[in-house]
Image: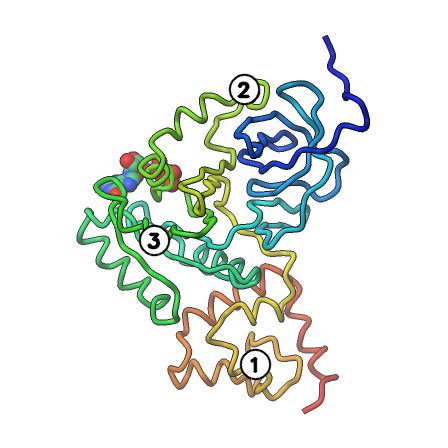
Amino acid sequence: MRTTCRSPNTSPIRGEIVAAFGKHFLVKTATDIALECVLRGKKGGAACGDQVEIRLTSPTQGVIESILPRSALLYRSDTSRQKVIAANVTQIIIVAAAVPAFSEELINRCLVAAESQRIKALIVLNKTDLAEPARAAFATLSLYGRLGYSLLQLSAKTDVKPLLPYLHGHLSVLVGQSGMGKSTIINALVPAAERATAEISPTLDTGRHTTTHARLYHLDEISGIIDSPGVQQFGLQHMSSEEVAWAFMEFHRYLGQCRFNNCRHIGEPGCALLQAVQEKKIDARRLDFYRKLIMSLTPSVGAFSSARQKVQH
Ligand code: GDP
Ligand code: ZN
């Protein structure tokens, strides 16, 4: 039998999205009841971590009527669409490992996304039990520690406890390529995670593998973690080139110092960032990642030279 809305006067219920399955969501209420919900209208989309108001359509189902204002929204985008990853997170945890090899470019994209939302970033080098490759990987990642990012080494398979102090008081989102150990970390932190997944109704999970969906787990009263296995590619098409430059924290002091006002730092003469690289004040890898990112945002960036003629000196 079809269910219909109760009386229109039914007051909305507050809840939190704890699982996102495309257009379907699992919302937990303050009394810990899990409701299968759909989003009213098509605007924007909702994400794990969103605080929402819902109206019941049956004892176990509802409609998300509104999304409360977010403190942060992490999303990725390519040229054709945007995808919300997580809402209201206060920390992004980038999981890397030596085996299989991690992508330093993806790490940089995640850091840019974190900076743009003013979210704390933590890089975790997992699988340190693989001692020799882990040492080399850590040497590469130490650059980010020097920049001021938190950098932690652990072996999630052996002991996930070193991560615990970093989680305290945060809503964290785990990102990284597949194979880095995100699921292993979640299962070690939340032994019931598998069971919780199994509890989700098949109507929400039609024919799809559960690990393709974002899920939120509360660790204690003030800490939670979102597992977002979809984050393999981190398109940042929604960002302007100025925003991208500002998201490289060590660039700040040089921005505005280039010869051309609208210097994009991709090879123009008199570029202060390039000079800083030559003087070893900025690591060349970071300027390279910045340039790759700019190129991916604007494939026609070669057109810049004609624009350059118009700028003031
Ligand atoms: P995910 O794709 O990021 O969720 O990665 P998984 O958690 O599925 O892990 C990928 C593979 O790495 C699995 O075979 C894990 O057993 C393995 N793995 C995870 N953590 C560790 C670790 O600390 N040490 C080692 N040696 N292997 C690990
Ligand atoms: Zn420049």
Query: In the image, which disc is placed on residue 201?
Result: 2
Mark 3 or mark 1: whose residue is earlier in sequence: 3
Q: Position of residue 254 (x, y in %)?
A: 52, 83
Q: Nearer the viewer, residue 272 or 90?
A: 90
Which tag, 1 or 2, sits closer to the chain's start?
2
Name the residue: 33% across, 62% down: 141
Point out the image quarter for the C terminus. bottom right
Res. 124 mark: 3
User: SS at mark 2?
Assistant: loop
Q: Looking at the image, which residue is at 37% across and 82% down?
A: 280
| Figure check: 3 above or below 160 | above
Q: Residue at x 36, y 51 (%)?
A: 102
Residue at which label 1 appears: 255
Q: Earlier in the sequence, mark 3 or mark 2?
A: 3
Q: Residue furthest bottom?
A: 313
The quarter of the displayed image where residue 300 is located: bottom right
Judge the density around disc 1: few (<14), some (14-19), many (≥20) Cα neighbours within 10 Å.
some
